[in-house]
C-alpha cells in the first residue's frame, strides 16, 4: 500500500475539483444539501465493511468518508465560513477538553469522571445554545436515522428519570401500542392514523431494545441479512422444482420458507 500521499494532497485534489473554471462539471456545482446524502451513505458503507470484517474495504470506505469531510470543508472555505484546518483544530480541542484525566493535570482526574453528556452540556452553555433550548432532550440531530434518533431521545429522557423502571412495563407498553395499531387497521381509521400508530410501535420497539441492551439498528440489519439468506434459498428451492415464484400459492411459498429456515438452521 502506497504511503506517498498526505492530507494536503487530498485537499488540493478537492480544491481542483471545485475550481470554477477548470474543475469537474459535477463537483463544482454541488452544495452542502446535495452532498449530504452521499456523506450519510459513506458512513453506512464504513459500518458495512466493519460488519463484514473486511479490512480492505474498510480502508477504502474510510477514504470515501474522509473525502466527504474534505468536501464539506472546501465548500465552507469557499463561503469564508471555516477551513479543513478549523475542523481539525476544533475536534482536537474538544477531545482534549473532554478528557482532562488523560491530557490534564492530576488535579483534573476527578473532573474527567464526569458524564460525557455533562461535558457536552457545558460546551453548549459556553456557546449560548442552552438559552435557546433548555429541554433535557435538546440537541438530538433531526438528520439522524429514525431508529438511532429514537434511542438518543429516550436515553436523554431517562437521564432525568423519565423512563420505565423495569422491562416488563416496556413490554406491556409495546403490546398496548400494537393493540392500538391493530385497532386502527381493523377499523380503517385512515392512513394518517395508521402511520401514527405504526410510529408508536416502532418507538416502543426501540425502547425495549434499549432496556435489554440491544441496538435496534444493528438488530434490524441482522434480520435483513437473515431474510436475504432465506429468501435466496427459497428462490433456489422453487427453481429446483421447475417453477416460478409468481406461480406459487401462498401456502406453497410458506412451505418453501419453512424448508429454507430448517436448512439454514441445520436442523
Image (cartoon, rainbow, N blue to C red):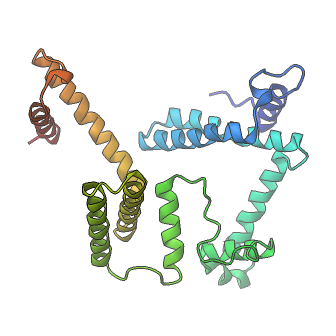
Left or right: 253 as drawn, with respect to 27: left
Name the image quarter holding the C terminus: top left
- Closer to us: 195 or 260: 195
Q: Is residue 72 above or below residue 105?
A: above
**Image quadrant assignment for residue 144:** bottom right
- Closer to us: 51 or 191: 191
Residue 15 visible in the picture: yes
* Residue 39 x %, y %: 63, 41
- Closer to us: 76 or 62: 76
Name the image quarter holding the N terminus: top right
* Residue 115 x %, y %: 59, 77
Residue drawn at point x = 80 percent, y = 35 percent: 11
- Closer to us: 222 or 131: 131
Q: Is residue 89 above or below residue 121?
A: above
Q: Is residue 39 above or below residue 20?
A: below
**Image quadrant assignment for residue 33:** top right
* Residue 185 x %, y %: 28, 55
Residue drawn at point x = 39 percent, y = 51 percent: 191
* Residue 46 x %, y %: 53, 41
Residue drawn at point x = 32 percent, y = 73 percent: 170
Amino acid at each position: 500500500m502506497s504511503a506517498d500521499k498526505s492530507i494536503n494532497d487530498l485537499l488540493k485534489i478537492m480544491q481542483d475539483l471545485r475550481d470554477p473554471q477548470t474543475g469537474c462539471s459535477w463537483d463544482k456545482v454541488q452544495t452542502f444539501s446535495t452532498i449530504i446524502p452521499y456523506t450519510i451513505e459513506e458512513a453506512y458503507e464504513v459500518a458495512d465493511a466493519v460488519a463484514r470484517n473486511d479490512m480492505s474495504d474498510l480502508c477504502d470506505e474510510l477514504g470515501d468518508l474522509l473525502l466527504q469531510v474534505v468536501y464539506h470543508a472546501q465548500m465552507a472555505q469557499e463561503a469564508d465560513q471555516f477551513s479543513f484546518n478549523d475542523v481539525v483544530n476544533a475536534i482536537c480541542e474538544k477531545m482534549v477538553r473532554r478528557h482532562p484525566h488523560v491530557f490534564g493535570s492530576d488535579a483534573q482526574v476527578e473532573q474527567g469522571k464526569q458524564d460525557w453528556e455533562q461535558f457536552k452540556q457545558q460546551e453548549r452553555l459556553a456557546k449560548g445554545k442552552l438559552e435557546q433550548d433548555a429541554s433535557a432532550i435538546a440537541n438530538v440531530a433531526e438528520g439522524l436515522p429514525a431508529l438511532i434518533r429514537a434511542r438518543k431521545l429516550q436515553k436523554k429522557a431517562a437521564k432525568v428519570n423519565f423512563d420505565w423502571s423495569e422491562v416488563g412495563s416496556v413490554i406491556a407498553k409495546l403490546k398496548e401500542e400494537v393493540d392500538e395499531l391493530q385497532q386502527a387497521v381493523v377499523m380503517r381509521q385512515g392512513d394518517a392514523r395508521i402511520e401514527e400508530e405504526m410510529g408508536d410501535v416502532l418507538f416502543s420497539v426501540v425502547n425495549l431494545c434499549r432496556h435489554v441492551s440491544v441496538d435496534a439498528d444493528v438488530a434490524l440489519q441482522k434480520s435483513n441479512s437473515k431474510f436475504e439468506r432465506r429468501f435466496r434459498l427459497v428462490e433456489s428451492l422453487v427453481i429446483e422444482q421447475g417453477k416460478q415464484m409468481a406461480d406459487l400459492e401462498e401456502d406453497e411459498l410458506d412451505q418453501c420458507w419453512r424448508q429454507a429456515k430448517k436448512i439454514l438452521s441445520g436442523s
